[in-house]
Image: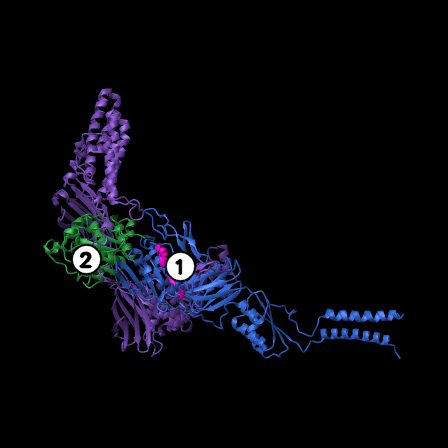
Chain colours: A green, B blue, C purple
Amino acid sequence: MSEFVFATAQYESGDWDSAPLVPANIIDTIARYTEIAVAPTGVVVRLDEERMLRYPLLYMTGHLPVRWSDAERRNVRRFVDRGGMLFIDDHNHDIDGTFHKTATEEITRTVGPLAELPNDHPLYSAFFKFDGPPTTSHELNGWGDNLVHKHLLAVQRNGRIAVLYSNKDYSSEWNYHPDNKRFQSVDNTRFAVNIVVYALTA
Amino acid sequence: MRSRRSLFESTCRIGAFAVLGWLLGASVIPSHAVRVERATNDDLAARLSAWTRETRSTLFHVDVGVAAPDARESAWLAALRRSGRRVSWSGAPLALAVAAEPLVNPEGGVRIDLAAPRGTAIALRDSVSAIDSLRVADLGGTVATPLAVGVVRAIAAGETASVVVPAPTVVKAVVVVGAASWEGKFVASALEEDGWPVDARFTVAPRIDVTSGGGAPALDTGRVAAVIAIDSTIDAYGPALERFVRMGGGLVLAGPAGMSRTVASLAPGMLGERTHPTVLPTDTIRLGSTGFYPVARLRDDGVVLERRPAGIAAAARRVGAGRVLEIGFDDSWRWRMAGAPGSEAAHRAWWSRVVAAVAYAPASIVRSSAASSAPLADLARALGPARTLAEAGPAGTGDPRIAITIIMILLLAEWASRRLRGRR
Amino acid sequence: MSVFSRLRLVRVLLGAGVALRAALWGAVAAASLLVGGIVVDQASALTPHTRATLLVVAAITAIATAASLAWRDRGVASLERVALWVEEQHPALEYVLITALERGAEPAPRIPSADAWTATALRRVARAIAGPAAAIVTASAILLALPAGAVARIRAPHPGDALERPRREANASRLTPLVARVAPPAYVKRADTTVDEPSDIRALVGSTVTLRGRGTSNGLVAVVGADTLHASSRGDEWSIVMTLGTKAATLRLVDHGDQRLVGLEPVLDQAPSVTLSTPAHDSVLRKPAGRIALAAEANDDYGIAQASFEYIVSSGEGETFTYKSGTLGAVMPRAVHATLSATLSLDALRLKPGDIVHVRAVARDANDATGPGVGTSETRTIRIARVDEYDSVAVDAAAPSDADKGAISERMLITLVEALLKKQSVLQRDGFINESRAIAADQKKLRRQVGDVVFTRLGGSPSGEEQSGDDTPQHAKNMQELLARADSATNRTEDPIDFGGGESPVIAVNKPLLEAYNAMWDAGTALDVGEPATALPHMRRALAAIERARQAERLYLRGQPPAVVIDIAKVRLEGKDKGASSVRRARTASDSTLRALDTRFMRIVALAARAPAAAADSLLVLRIDALDLNAPFAGALGEAAAAIRAGRGTDATSALARARRTLVGVPVARDSLGRWGVLP
């Protein structure tokens, strides 16, 4: 049976590879806490290729403007319609930043408007229990928009999350080599397990 | 005094003339004892009422042509026959039969089975409009329609067989069991989206599951229609699974679940080595094109449902009152996600049919006196086999050939007697 | 006056009489037709089209009647025939007149009774026109006696004149006749339309719909969803005004026990479509200087209010980025088509290396009801190369700057070789070889630059080739090996489904460069031995490979990609924390709304045999509810409702069958009975 393959979305307009160690870190975390059959490496898939439909959970990040091409927009729409989940993280951590403005505009145009995800959503209890989206050191340090975002945003379809959008900058928080996890008292990537388990079961 | 021989000869002569006179009389004067009433399909309905008032000695004969009378008329004729009248029929109606059974599906639907000779073209329609048509390849055919209204009619070569559309079944829960994976997620999703109540249990870590519905309910045909095993986590059910199946429950073994030890005694066959993908990296994915587990060793009572060049992709088997379906596909989710346009709906419909093929759902069959599901069979059951009017003719009239033979014998005896005593 | 002159006067009088009589009979025929039409219209309302046709038919009838009569009496044009007619009227002439006329005798004979001919002719004319004149008077009297509205409906038929028909019964329904006037939103600048007896109103969202009928407004309401609208009165008419929303709805007009349904089908104003034609593709520039022409086209269904180019400049790298944005070339065309053009000055933007300019065209329509609708084009990016990217391969911009002209490129080397081959015949062998070797030296430099790019990206030293001092093909092999290692770290080629297909970014960028590198090597070797003709195909192959690499440059690779492979078996369940079981939410049936339609459809089908009118109304309501969910189904329902109302049973059955197939799909038929009842 197919194992779970962590896929990073590559899009035309921006620096999609701004957090290159996040995939490995999430794969490590999945293996560390669960029995989920997971591939040891991730893949990068272009949003404008139909091949992206083979990965029902896609991670997308960046700092630069998000301007999807027609092909990217068409594929994202099909991806969501068919039950895929797109996890987008604003690497700027800035709601006034260009990534946030352009990405939310594209999501609204392509999939639908984003809305605040309630902090009691099943996502936060899919594996580990959270009271809401875990904060990141970038938020607490006052980087980006100098805000601690209390909610994630999402587009939901038929009761499930189709697009999960984060201003928390998990891309910076989780962008380190998994071997360094042993130096942490609390694993800050645990929320990634919830995202993957939710995507695999919801 | 006349001799005995002379008396014999006179008797023969009188007898011969008497039989000849009887023959002439029978041919000229109609018999009042036996009347023959004939009808065809066209005027049968109008004449039945009058026939009912006829005397018991009347013979009723119906020339049905190519279509048996409808259910009401057949029943009326049967009643006449049971009341002591002589009723016969002739003609060559098509041997046609239709049966309808509700599909085990939240969306409802009806499966219509047809029986007819090879090559028969059958048109199906219900109370609203045409449903479909087919040409029988071998003894019969099947049409599954999502919607049928009122009475379904199968029409072929002038014959019509009818059946009342049955009421939909009450759909019970489907249990989906497996490790957290795309296949389990999308199987449960597809069934839920199609309206099935799903109890899912996905194992994430040791003693940590994600569940929905009842999660891991006791397997009972009163509540559960079928179990879908995605992988070997089905072993957790142990012997309860076999009891459930033998009680009438359905079991679907998807992909590697067929290798599980718990289902070894239930599976239609043993799984072979997974086939290689037949899809190129950039191709649009179809069901099974990414490889599947073929059913390598099929049991004697196993039924092949789908055969592919690489092996048997689906096989089924009855176990006790239940049914077990083994499908080799372990990543049908890829077909849904990366298939051609419409593959999401196709995936949903396919899984719905998979469950329907085994699900436990006792159905009540509706019978109506207004519909004849097998007109020829009903007619034969009511009136016996077809006979011509001559075969069924009035009793007592006798065969004229016998009478002529008697006359000949009498005359020959009289002539011989006379010659033997030297008279001309 | 001579006899002949008198005869000619008689001919004129008779001719005038013939013409007048023909015209009058023509008018009588037309008037009769119109009167008949009016009577029929009063009995059963004719459509505006039929009434307009009736006018045309009346005119043609009048002309045809007049023409046929005139043709029948065409003899009046002949002087001989007129003379005979005079002889007939005055037998005392004893053919003197006709004889004189035939002989053409001059001077004309004197006939004393000639003065009486005019009077005779006038009397004949008077008799001839008396009949049609009486008929025309009668027809006129009938027309005058008819109600004014009745004549007007025939004279000037137009949509909405159903209300001009005189009311026949005092207690007739106020819901019939019904007229709807649709006024589109002001921004589309289109004329109002009127519909008689509407069963379905299809109009642009934001349109004002006025429903009018005869009678007072007392107690008359329109129900749309949860809203109830009360009618207002004006004269002997009631009216209800409403604005068309974005959702299809059924309007229910209620007059105490009487009710009537009208479907409201909104049409959405589509957002403009915008195409950016220039620049045609993304570019990477070496210098942030020069001007880039921008051109785009926009189209809209009703009109574009404003269109412009938008740009965003992203500066920075790593975790620190700044942005600035602006618009260019704004136009307000107020038309359905707009052409945009502007010039983007890179100097004015004061760009720095690494900066990226995103340009797109944006158009907004004038929709002030639900919009404005915004359409955007594809986005083009113009990136300013960083210093470490100055390899001449990434510096082939769509809008080349002057600085590029000084750079050594593969294309320039090809030009040099082609020039050398042209002058080969006039050069000495030594000179030819020297020039070829000079080009070979440049080719070598360029090849090293390409090598540095690949090495840098794959984590090697930018000057790996230089450090070794070994200029052998072995380096190409090393590069291939390095490429293979990097690829295997990021890809699992044994899995063709998840990891196969589509090259990884490592391959996508570096493979063409490696091909270019090898081609340059072959070209340099040929040039070194004085065989530029042999070198030329390799150089062209190298150039093509560089072009492909330039396209792949869009991948934004920033050096070595991560090659972290997790040892799953080693870390499995080694986490410090433990999760917990959870509950997932079951999904609702995706087509539950469609299923509800299915149920309603079945009920209506059952109703159709017993109460066709009620079924037609129900189909209309169902159609409105189904419009957004299943448009083909809704279309078939509309046809079925219309057929049921018109009493066309066969059409209704056909439409219902089509609707059913559209809603629930087609049956699956198998031509044999299987051993297993239901097959997957």
Figure label count: 2
C66 and C10: which one is in front?
A: C66
Tell us which disc is closer to us: 1 or 2: 1
Q: For residue C225, which quarter of the picture?
A: bottom left
State yes or no: residue B252 in magenta: yes
State yes or no: residue A96 in magenta: no
Disc 2, SS: loop
Q: Amino acid at mark 2?
A: Asp
On the image, the x and y values in percent for residue B410 come to 80, 71
In the shown orientation, is residue B414 left or right of residue C301? right
Q: Amino acid at mark 1?
A: Ser
Is residue C173 shown above or below B254?
below
Which region is colored magenta?
A: B246-262
Q: For residue B302, which quarter of the picture?
A: bottom left
Q: Determine which residue is flagged by label 1.
A: B265
- From where the camera sits, is residue C284 visible? yes
On the image, the x and y values in percent for residue C247 come to 27, 65
Question: What chain does mark 2 sit on?
Answer: C
In the shown orientation, is residue B212 left or right of residue C671? left
Q: Determine which residue is flagged by label 2.
A: C577
Question: What chain does mark 1 sit on?
Answer: B
Which corner quadrant holds the C terminus of chain C? Answer: bottom left
Q: CA distance from mark 1 to mark 2?
A: 40 Å
- From where the camera sits, is residue C10 visible? no
Which corner quadrant holds the N terminus of chain C? Answer: bottom left
Whether discs 1 and 2 lie on one chain: the answer is no
C290 and C185: which one is in front?
A: C290
